[in-house]
Amino acid sequence: MSDVSWPLWEVFVRARRGLSHTHVGSLRAPDAAMALRNARDLYTRRQEGVSIWVVPAAGITASSPDEKDAFFEPAADKVYRHPTFYQVPDGVAHL
Amino acid sequence: MGHNCKIDGVEGVQVFRGVVLQVLAWGWCGCNTYLVYGNDFPGPDGGLLGEVEAAEAALRDAAERGLAGAAGRQGADEATLRDYFTAVIEADQKIEPRDWMPEAYRKTLIRQIAQHAHSEIIGMQPEGNWITRAPSLKRKAILLAKVQDEAGHGLYLYAAAETLGVSRDELVQMLLEGRQKYSSIFNYPTLTWADVGAIGWLVDGAAIVNQVPLCRCSYGPYARAMIRICKEESFHQRQGYEILHTLSHGTPAQKAMAQDAIDRWWYPSLAMFGPPDTASTHSEQSMAWKIKRFSNDELRQRFVDMCVQQAEILGLTLPDPDLRWNEQRQAYDYTQPDYDELMRVIKGDGPCNRQRIEHRRRAHREGAWVREAAAAYAAKDRVRQEAAA
C-alpha cells in the first residue's frame, strides 16, 4: 500500500497582490487539499506568497521543445503586430 | 549533559517576540527579498549572498538574451541536437527539463542532485538530536525552523531531480538501500550543544561556499532550487555563529565547550569539499558542462580564507598549528584534512553511518501508516466526488 506513489503537483505562488502566480516548483501529495498544505509548508515558509495554486502535473499539456521553432514560427513574420513597425510622422503627439 | 547551557533564558524569548513584531511591522513592502531576508542583503559585491543575487540576475539576463540560430527541430539528428545543447551551455543559458541532453549529463545531474537531497534529509538528524535539549525556548524555536528548512531543501532538490525523469520514490528507496550516498559530514556525532553552533557555522558555511556557484549551474531547475536554498542557508550559518559567539563569551566551561566543538568539526568540514583536485573523478566533465564551476581545492581555500577572521572574532582557535597567511599566494596555508578518513566515512565506516541510515529506515517505516491513510482518504474522496457528480 505504501508503495502507491502520490501524484506530482506543480506549485504556483502569487508573491503579492497585483502580481501573477509564478511557478515555484513541484511536490508529491495524495490529493489537492494535502498538496495545498504541503505547498504552504514547503514554498511559503518565509511569507513568499499570499496565494497558492496547485495543479496536477499530469494535467499540464506542454509544447515540445523539439518543435519550438516550427511551433512559434507564425509569430516571427508578423512584425506589423508591434507598434515599432509603423512610421510616425514628425510632430505627432499622443500616438 | 554536564554542561549548563542556559544562557539565553527569558530575554531570549523576548528577542524572539521582538523579531516577530519587527517582521509584522514591515508589512507590505515592495521587495520580497527585503521582507524575507532582512535589510542587510548586500549588493553584487557584498559577499556570498550578493553572489546568489547576482546569479539570480544573470539567470534572468540570459533568459532575455535568447539564443541566435536555434536548432533542435523535430527529427533533427543527434549531432545537431548535441551542437545546440553545447551552444546553450556556452552561452551561459539554462538547459530545461524537456530539452535534449546527453545521457551522461542527465545521469550526472541525477546522481549529484539526489546525493544533495539525501544529505539534507540525513542532515536533519545530528541537529534534531538537540531539539528537545535546546537551552532556551528561543534556541529551540530557531533549531526547529532550521531543521524544517533542511527537510524543505531536501524536497526542493527531489523536485528538481524529478524533472530529469526519476521519481522521488525511486530516490528515497536508493537512499534507504544504501545505493546512493549523502554527505560524509553527517556521519559525525553531535556530542554537545556547541556542536549545533559548529554545524551552523562550519558545516553550513562550507555548504554555502560549495553551493553558491551551483546557483549558476547550467541545469535550470537545479540552479533555481539552489538560489532558494542558498538564501535560506545563510540564516543557518548565522544562527550557528551566534551560538558559538554566545558560548565563547560565557563562562570558561562554555567557551571550552565551543572550542571543543570547533576542534572536532574543523577537519571534517574541510573534507566536505571532496578529495583534492588530483584525485577527483567527476570534476573535469562537470566543469565543461558548467554543472560545477570551481574545483574542490579552490572552494576549500576560499572557505579557509573566510573562516580565519570569523574565528578571531569568536575568540576561538582553528585547530591547525600550520595555518598562516601566505603573502605570495594571497591566501592562507593550511593543513589538509585526512582524506583516508574521508574515504572510510564515505564507504560506510564513519562514527554514525549505521545509526543514521537505520534511523532513516525506521522513520520511513513508522511513517508508512500516514502515507497509507492519506492515500486511502484520497481514494475514498475521489469515489465520493464521482458519486456526487
Image (cartoon, coloured by chain):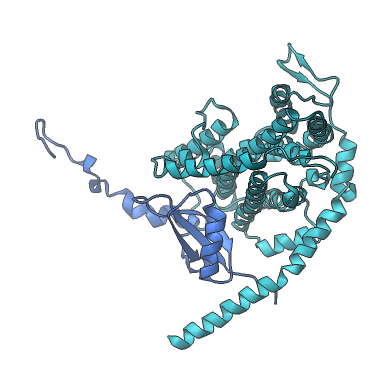
Is B323 situated left or right of B102 in this image? right
Q: Is residue B102 visible?
A: no
Q: Residue at x 45, y 37 (%)?
A: B61
Q: Nearer the viewer, residue A32 or B136?
A: B136
Q: Residue at x 70, y 77 (%)?
A: A1
Instruction: Work out which quarter of the rendered image holds the N terminus of chain B and state it.
Output: top right
- Which residue occupies the extreme front position in the image? B10
B171 versus B266 height, above or below: below
- Which residue occupies the extreme top position in the image? B327
Q: Nearer the viewer, residue B289 or A94?
A: A94
Q: Nearer the viewer, residue B94 or B172?
A: B172
Q: Is residue B36 visible?
A: yes
Q: Residue B371, position in %: x, y?
A: 66, 71
Q: Colour of chain A?
A: blue
Q: Nearer the viewer, residue B200 or B71?
A: B200
Q: Residue B245, position in %: x, y?
A: 70, 30
Is B264 situated left or right of B241 in this image? right
* Residue A83 quadrant: top left
Q: Residue at x 37, y 50 (%)?
A: A19
Instruction: Work out which quarter of the rendered image holds the C terminus of chain B and state it.
Output: bottom left
B73 versus B286 height, above or below: below
Q: Residue B77, position in %: x, y?
A: 56, 53
Q: Colour of chain B?
A: cyan
Q: Residue B156, position in %: x, y?
A: 60, 53
- Which residue occupies the extreme bottom position in the image? B387
Q: How many marks?
A: 0
